[in-house]
Image (tube, coloured by chain):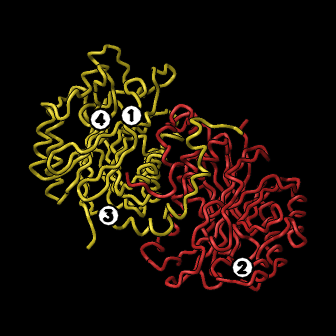
Chain colours: A red, B yellow
Amino acid sequence: MSRTIVAAAAQMGPIARSDTRKAVVERLIALLGEAASRGAELVVFPELTLTTFFPRWHMTDPNEIDAFYEAEMPGPETLPLFEAAKRLKIGFYLGYAELAVENGVKHHYNTAILVDRDGAVVGKYRKIHLPGWDKPQPDMAAQHLEKYYFEPGNLGFNVFETMGTRIGMAICNDRRWPETYRVMALKGSEMILVGYNTPDDHTGNFDFDSLTQFHNQLSIQAGAYQNSNWVVATAKAGHEEGSNLIGQSMIVAPSGQIVAMATSTADEVIVAKCDLDMAALYRKTIFDFARHREPDQYRLIVETKGPVLD
Amino acid sequence: MSRTIVAAAAQMGPIARSDTRKAVVERLIALLGEAASRGAELVVFPELTLTTFFPRWHMTDPNEIDAFYEAEMPGPETLPLFEAAKRLKIGFYLGYAELAVENGVKHHYNTAILVDRDGAVVGKYRKIHLPGWDKPQPDMAAQHLEKYYFEPGNLGFNVFETMGTRIGMAICNDRRWPETYRVMALKGSEMILVGYNTPDDHTGNFDFDSLTQFHNQLSIQAGAYQNSNWVVATAKAGHEEGSNLIGQSMIVAPSGQIVAMATSTADEVIVAKCDLDMAALYRKTIFDFARHREPDQYRLIVETKGPVLD
């Protein structure tokens, strides 16, 4: 008997800076209800799901900044989402800005948690590949300040055994880096969950920007195929505070085939039944890592950060 | 002024077991001539270009086996190709089975060489990711015995500064492994050359085999995009000794876009003018390795061959 999980990507349309957490959580609960009605057992929400994508602005007042972060999860405003999911017996992935106090010091992370069907937080991931800059770029029309607002994740790429499968998590830009998928696949993942906010008007170079949707598909499909994993990837999409965020939330099979894709840039649920044993077709043949990988030849991947012209 | 190179993929149709080296080299020279007439400065031939794809058979007689290998390059039968290329001022990549004597011991490699426009061999690569098996598989309809006929390459993934650019080489199955491109990109490659022989009737599992062409495109496009490299990939194609080899020879830009593709499974030349500075668009932004890679988080990639369920 094959092992299956019905997964959903719950794409969100834009969130205005003036939208309250309460209003956002109501939208999340509505999406959860639709996913449940379509048989979903696991729902993936976007990156930084609870507010607008604030790294597009340069703020300097710590109080203004910290208002975009969650100091507890669940907190009073997010608890209704956890309660609804527990009642519906649905697990979920939720991306949010995390304010953490570690050894008495405040830290800021771009975080996702994994919640099981009983409402327990069973996994946490903090974004490792932060794109953009650590200070404003005066010569760029659009700012992208993730390196200013967040520290790189300090929890590694991990895999969580839950809901009958082994789940890895990544966030947005992580999905473009093949190392992301590979580390989790080597830890035995069968399914990788990704939330993202991806503008298609970002660099101001049209040759580049006009390929944003193609690059989104290419990265996710290659990651799925080359690692024999299901990937569920969910966008925050649409015209948000002057920026165009792509949609294309998708569920991709271990074959690299897109089995479901959102067609709007608004709140939208897509659902697919994922056969977890499908990965074996690739892992036992062309991607049998134990027979075919040659790690001695890969050392430069960890020995250097930037290029070495040897 | 932008730096450009006009590159060609010289796809070959099938080679029968009974075909002579002389007949094959005549075909190669004809392809070279067509490429030259279309302005090519660099031509990429397939993997194991000089004979039929012999790893589909299980042979045991060492003399019968060694007849498929080249003990010198150029040898008397391949010298006319080198002379023609030198006359036309075209560089080329050529894949062949290499019989090497190292420290008095015979070794067998699946090899490619890079020859510059003056006819000098300026680079050699020996295939690292050997697919298939080291002994016949009685329960499989089609045999794939590369691990029986070849040792894994012992030269690493290298980059050769020649013809105004920095060129890396890979062979066939290497193109499915993201580590292949990454190591060469970290060594500063701008262009990666790949020859392949890829059957689409290999596993006997139709769900898998029917996606062979899609997987070929996906792997090459992702490797190009995620590493900001041009990729020129050339097939030996067509119905060869009972096996169907896919075509789809292609030239892919650092954007991941396919800029040229073969439409046949026969001898066919495709040509594209490659702007080598195009890679900078990605390497200075989203794939600025020195700013964005996080090698400490990638250690498992080199610390294990097969999966570790931690």
Q: Which label's residue is closer to the chain start, 4 or 3?
A: 4
Q: Which label's residue is closer to the chain start, 4 or 1?
A: 4
Say which amino acid is labelled 1.
Answer: Gly
Report the Cα–Cα distance between label 3 and label 1.
28 Å
Q: Chain of mark 4?
A: B
Left or right side of B272 for A201: right
Q: Label 2, on which residue? A: A15
Q: Is residue B150 shown to the viewer in this render?
A: yes
Q: Label 4, on which residue? A: B48
When the figure is inspected, residue B46 is found, relative to residue B282, above or below; the finding is: above
For mark 1, give the secondary structure: loop
Q: Is residue B211 shown to the viewer in this render?
A: no
Label 3 close to label 1 by CB (< 8 Å): no
Question: Which label belongs to residue A42?
Answer: none
Q: Chain of mark 2?
A: A
| Quarter of the N terminus of chain B within the rendering | bottom left
| Quarter of the C terminus of chain B within the rendering | top right
Question: Which label belongs to residue B153?
Answer: 1
Residue A49: x and y in percent read: 73, 70
Say which amino acid is labelled 2.
Answer: Ile
For mark 3, give the secondary structure: helix
Report the Cα–Cα distance between label 4 and label 3.
28 Å
Name the residue rendered at 78%, 77% in the picture. Answer: A66
Say which amino acid is labelled 3.
Answer: Leu
Q: Label 3, on which residue? A: B276
Same chain for the residues under marks 4 and 2 in the image: no
Q: Chain of mark 3?
A: B
Report the Cα–Cα distance between label 1 and label 2.
53 Å
